[in-house]
Amino acid sequence: MIADISALILILLVMVISHELIHLLSAYLLGVRIKGFGFSLFGPIFILRDEYLVDNDLKLILVHTSPLILSLTFLFNNFYCFLFSSLNLTGSIGDIYLLIKLLRIRDVNMRCLYSRRVEEKIKRISIIKYWD
């Protein structure tokens, strides 16, 4: 029983960390700079610089949906890929919600303002170390 719970916690931890690392890798490949890094109750958080992201819809879409796209490609490979991918899909719900909110804001300055408000909320619920 305890071993099963420990295994589940380990799987979830690996899934969350890999999900966030996929966001980070896609941002890096697209030339988006990182503003900060930290941890929350749900795992690692990367704060990206607005000026490299919010004015380009394609970059915004790719960074937010990269874990979702990767999950869908491995969804039906085998049982473990299915399990990992389906858990990752549930983690993508917040990414898609934020992406839709940002894409509905057409003005880049208003998009930056919304992004910074979200960043402030994240700061309140997590331990974040910022750097420039």
Image: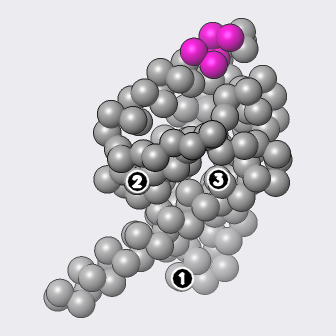
Tag 3: amino acid:
His
The image shows residue 109, relative to residue 22, as above or below, that is above
Question: Dot 3, crowdedness within 10 Å: few (<14), some or many (≥20)?
Answer: many
Q: Quadrant of residue 103?
A: top right
Q: Nearer the viewer, mark 1 or mark 2?
A: 2
Nearer the observer, 22 or 78:
22
Q: How crowded is mark 1: few (under 14 residues within 10 Å), some or many (20 or more)?
A: few
Assess whether residue 41 is covered by the magenta stretch: no
Examine the rendered structure and indicate whether residue 52 appears above or below residue 91: above
Residue 51 in percent (x, y) is at 73, 27
Callout 1: SS: helix
Compared with residue 69, is residue 121 higher up or lower down, i.e. above or below?
A: above
- Which portion, as a residue range, is magenta? 109-113
Q: Answer whether labels 3 and 2 touch (C-beta < 8 Å).
A: no
Say which residue label 3 marks: 23
Q: What element carries label 2?
A: strand
Question: Could you say where residue 125 lies in the image, as x and y percent from the top left?
Answer: 31, 39
- Residue at image position (51%, 42%) is 130
Q: Give residue 60's position: percent from left, percent from top.
A: 72, 35
What residue is pinned by disc 1? 79
| Pick the front one: 51 or 80 | 51
Cα separation, mark 1 vs mark 3, equals 24 Å
Rendered position, 84 above or below 88: below
Q: Position of residue 69 (x, y in %)?
A: 70, 56
Residue 72 visible in this rendered orientation of the protein? no
**Residue 39's disc number:** 2
